[in-house]
Image (spheres, rainbow, N blue to C red):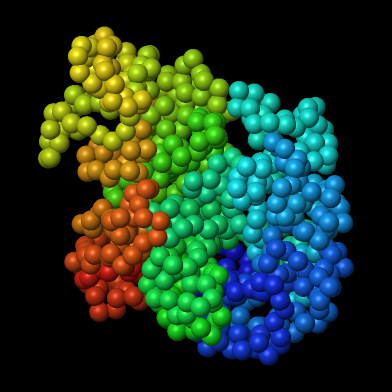
Amino acid sequence: MQRDSRQDARGYTRTPYRLEHRPTHRLHSKDELLKILDVLSESGVKAWWYSAASKGSYPLFKSKYLPYRTDAVEPEYYQWLSAEAHKRDIVLFSWDYLNCAPLLTAEHPEWRFQFLNGDTHETPRESHFVCYNSPYGRLLKDYCVEVVGELGFDGIWFDGCYHSTDSGVKLACRCEFCNAKHREATGRDIPQTVDWTSRAFREFIEWRYDDSEGYWRSLSGYVRERCPDAIIVFNYFNRLAHDWRGGSPLRRMPMEGMIASEVDCKPQQLLLQHKILRALNDNYPTEVWVTGQDAVTPFYDGRPNPDPTMIAFHFQTSATAGGYGSVGPADKPSNVSETLSSLSKTMKSVSPYIDGEAIPFVGLVVSGATKDYAHPGDAWPTWRSVLGMHNLLNALHYPSEVLLDNMLTAEFLHRYPVVVLPDVQCMSEESAQALREYVETGGCLIALGATGTRTLLGDPRETGVLDELFRITWRDEQGIHPVMEIASPMLQGQGLPARYMMSGLAHLVRSDSAEVLARAKYRPGPGKVFTEKGLLENTAEEVMGDVILSVRHGKGNAFYLAQDVGGDYALNTNRRSREVIRRIVESLFTPPLETNAPPNVVVAPRRQGGKTILHLLNVPSQMLHIDGTKQFHEDFVPVDTISITYPGRWAKASSPTHPDGIGFELSSEEITLFLTGLVRHAIIVIE
């Protein structure tokens, strides 16, 4: 996307990485700040999150809009700091909470969150949550303009963009302001308790998503209109492992603001998270934060100069996904200057080759409705399905991007030769019709598991909304892990026998007119069978059903796999599941690239002008599982020579990260690249 440099907050969105180091309880002296700035400048840090407020959202300057601490300084203090940062070519952002203003709630307790399942405020933090539908919402807008327009900050990075307390017990807000707004829109009061059987409760969840999106748009637009160079960033709380409680919509919502996020040090989550952020809002390159790590320990005060390997890998992984990273909290910058210098050196050769245009091949559908309503109160099954399928596509070296529920339209679907629906149970009729038209006009649709069996709000359908497309006439209620009887030569030979298993629980189906690629059965009598309820005695009558179906429609093809392949692959990577998907896809299309790289090496191409940038990432094997170690260690296994064949008339290839380790051969139709030795990350530029 062509972006306006005037809306780049002094180049913030292009800085190699961003450092968080902010006041906790006290103001720094100007001498202290000068020493910090000098260390950051000498270490190569180009973007710094400081703050106009102390920890807990207590303003440290004499604001005209929000109550401030008794020791607050005049605005000149921050104007001076901003000027000093800019002298050193450092972009300065103010970190703050979106929904927290303890001095204001002390003055106006009626503006506080009134939680959905009880309005008591048992901890000090719970009493600090303030609702933007109260007059606070307008005050916060003016406060933001004050910070970026008068104090000189280049933007504001809002943490705490969620609607539940840290414990996740106190949920949402039903204060008088929210309730009046909800009643005006729906004619009903906000529900007082969590009740998944109530359609009104589920509609309230959707209303709350609309309300969050509306305020984010309003706030960022308000600031941009008055301060065109500033950026408002919202920390996104609907990431992997999160559920409906955070209140952040999982839908496309372009806006003047930037939507960023944070993850644990898990590269398989980080790669997907960047793609989700890009689907949400691609007005800016994506950004994901991580806590600074020395092996498995965060580097808080007293732990100076951690080994930069783990932190650098976060940034290299982000770059592979087409985005940037941020890190914090940091010890005193003087105590971590060697680490920061090492990070800056690592990213110097990488940062010019981040971002660019994704090269589309597979559109992976990530359904917020399925996450919320298919398994009420438990988002993990959906996240497992999505993450596992994303890992599988990476292992096949198929470039993929994310499609959200409201992106299942012709505008987005036709960007991808292949679209994958990983157990997308909740779907609207409008989306289903768009998918039918996508297939008719030449697309390849691969649906897995119970796709389309529920409405968008989670109500079960008598007939799946895509069942006619796949010619499904019957679905079994018994979930099993089937041994497949292969009925198509496409899925046999070259290492695939006539009978084998794939990842994932399946509900067998039957079809009267689809081409059956694989069948399965389970038998009655003594013995046990693996079911969705565990290992149980098999007393059912013999059932024969279909597992993999293929249907031709118009110019395109629709494939249905009864297994929830991704849900199991996230826990158990396996070659046969990959091979089945590969044979289905490559029976129709040639992938954008061919490579001998092993499955744990991600190969991600992007376009920059007339160049193609290839990122190669060697993911530690223990991190390919969703239940892997929370943090990762130095278990990078070096990979020998990797070859990549890429189509097109190219003139040359080079590598800014491995200048002596790259070779290539040219033909009239393609280039074959050779990279000698990959430990963590490499970049290849072809032009």
Instruction: Give left or right: position of 7 versus 119.
Output: left
Q: Is residue 605 visible?
A: no
Quadrant in the picture for the N terminus: bottom right
Say which of 493 and 637 sits in front: 637
Quarter of the rendering containing residue 542: top left
Q: Depth check: give the residue in front, 527 or 592.
A: 527
**Residue 626 position in % (x across, y down):** 38, 48
From the viewer's perspective, is 245 left or right of 465?
right
Q: Position of residue 123 (x, y in %)?
A: 70, 51
Please state, as top left, top right, bottom left or bottom right, where the C terminus lies in the image.
bottom left
| Residue sitting nearer the eye, 186 or 58 | 58
Q: Which residue occupies 70% across, 63% down?
A: 56
Q: In the rendered view, would you say 479 is above or below 348?
A: above
Do we see residue 188 in this rendering?
Answer: yes
Q: State the residue at coordinates (75%, 43%).
A: 120
Which residue does the image show at 62% across and 42% down from the upper left? 169
At 58% across and 71% down in the image, what residue appears?
20
Instruction: Specify the farthest residue to the top.
Output: 541
Q: Position of residue 640 (x, y in %)?
A: 18, 66
Residue found farthest to the front = 122
* Above or below, 35 relative to 201: below
Q: Quadrant of residue 524?
A: top left
Total numbered labels placed on residues in the image = 0
Q: Position of residue 144 (x, y in %)?
A: 77, 64
